[in-house]
Image (tube, rainbow, N blue to C red):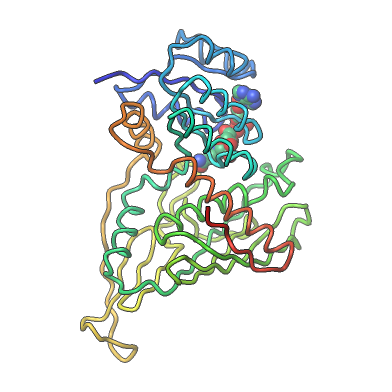
């Protein structure tokens, strides 16, 4: 099997997580890093791989099959376009780019170059996510009518020390809600309309403290979602699943999908239904726990990157799909600011 040679652009918080994933697999090797920060020098010396100050120089040096882009979001566009110019397979962290216009240019340039772009929405790689999608699409809970969910945490005060983290561009909608939106799009199908209310009456920074969203899916199901970075609760994806060792596990489910024949708690799957097919509110309703294995989603994503490089798989989430998740997320901000329902373009 061909060993995949990958370069990393941006060896910060999430870049280091990608390095762990690469190291866990025999089929892929980290062969170079591009990062202007001096703090990365120790890392490359230990590994005996070249360090470049700029991605462009790393691409020009050649010897790469793929690149993982984990630099700050405002650099994604230039780096990804450059990588595509060098005919590389690209895994770019979420969001794909800072703007929709940039994301669309990436999508069409990747098509022109016949290159694949994967977007780092790692939640798609968890077995519980795929199982939830399969349950809903198989009709086990009947016709999907509605969903409700939340992502509510209280972030630590040091988090907001850098001034940029107090701005809308780094607020919880663009940082955290985009994961929820991508997850819901994957499980339920496309979102075609959003409306929203935001408030910042706790910290009073320009970023939002909480947002409440109403949405409509292409299959006519409706949904609501509440997100806040100011509220201590056990009801959020990371704590429910224990995805990240930094955040204690609560095992409390944060999302519920409701169909005409039953309902599904997520991500620790519990399927609720009556024992008879036409059961109703006068009948007892029973829970069925559905076990799925816990995996390291970054390793699964990295393994998938290798398959995409070899041409044996197409991206689970490519550029066009990643653009759509960004588009819906940005539509939430617009809907709240303008006090309107925003219809999501089909293109
Ligand atoms: N998938 C997830 O759950 C997840 C989680 C966190 C961050 N992210 C995304 O990952 C990206 C990076 O976030 P982070 O928290 O790791 O940031 P970070 O600040 O911790 O790290 C960024 C790194 O990029 C380097 N860098 C800056 N400009 C660069 C350039 N032009 N070329 C190469 N390297 C450059 C910095 O020196 C730093 O080492 C963002 O797009 C963010 O949205 C995704």
Q: Is residue 266 above or below residue 281?
A: above
Residue shown at 32% from the left, 66% from the top: 270
Name, please, the residue furthest toward the front.
Answer: 112
Residue 19, image x and y in percent? 44, 25
The answer to which quarter of the image holds residue 72 is top right
Q: Is residue 203 left or right of residue 139?
A: right
Residue shown at 25% from the left, 86% from the top: 278
Q: Is residue 41 left or right of residue 248?
A: right
Task: Identify which residue, 195 or 20, lies in the foreground.
Answer: 195
Q: Quadrant where the N terminus lies?
A: top left
Q: Is residue 260 left or right of residue 328?
A: left
Residue shown at 43% from the left, 11% from the top: 63
The answer to which quarter of the image holds residue 344 is bottom right
Name, please, the residue furthest toward the left.
Answer: 276
Residue 327, image x and y in percent? 58, 52
Q: Is residue 96 above or below residue 10?
A: below
Residue 66, image x and y in percent? 43, 23
Q: Quadrant of ligand 1?
A: top right
The answer to which quarter of the image holds residue 13 is top right
Residue shown at 57% from the left, 50% from the top: 176
Residue 159, image x and y in percent? 66, 43
Q: Is residue 128 above or below residue 1?
A: below
């Amino acid at each position: 099997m061909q060993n995949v040679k990958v370069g990393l652009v941006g060896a910060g918080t999430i870049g280091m997580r990608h390095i762990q994933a690469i190291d866990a697999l025999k089929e892929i090797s980290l062969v170079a890093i591009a990062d202007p920060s001096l703090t990365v020098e120790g890392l490359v010396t230990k590994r005996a791989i070249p360090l470049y100050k700029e991605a462009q120089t790393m691409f020009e040096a050649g010897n790469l099959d793929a690149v993982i882009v984990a630099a700050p979001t405002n650099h994604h566009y230039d780096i990804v376009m450059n990588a595509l110019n060098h005919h590389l397979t690209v895994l770019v962290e979420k969001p794909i780019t800072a703007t929709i216009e940039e994301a669309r240019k990436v999508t069409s340039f990747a098509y022109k170059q016949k290159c694949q772009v994967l977007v780092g929405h790692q939640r798609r790689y968890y077995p519980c996510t795929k199982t939830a999608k399969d349950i809903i699409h198989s009709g086990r809970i009947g016709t999907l009518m509605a969903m409700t969910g939340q992502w509510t945490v209280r972030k630590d005060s040091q988090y907001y020390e850098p001034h940029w983290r107090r701005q809308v561009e780094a607020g919880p909608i663009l940082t955290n809600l985009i994961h929820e939106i991508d997850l819901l799009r994957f499980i339920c199908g496309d979102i075609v309309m959003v409306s929203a209310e935001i408030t910042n009456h706790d910290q009073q920074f320009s970023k939002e403290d909480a947002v409440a969203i109403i949405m409509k899916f292409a299959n006519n199901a409706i949904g609501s979602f509440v997100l806040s970075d100011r509220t201590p609760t056990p009801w959020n994806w990371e704590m429910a699943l224990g995805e990240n060792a930094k955040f204690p596990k609560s095992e409390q489910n944060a999302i519920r999908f409701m169909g005409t024949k039953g309902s599904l708690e997520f991500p620790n799957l519990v399927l609720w239904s009556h024992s008879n097919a036409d059961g109703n509110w006068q009948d007892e309703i029973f829970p069925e726990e559905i076990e799925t294995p816990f995996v390291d989603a970054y390793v699964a994503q990295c393994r998938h990157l290798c398959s995409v490089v070899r041409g044996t798989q197409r991206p689970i989430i490519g550029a066009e799909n990643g653009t759509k998740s960004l588009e819906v997320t940005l539509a939430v901000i617009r809907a709240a600011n303008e006090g309107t329902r925003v219809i999501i373009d089909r293109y």
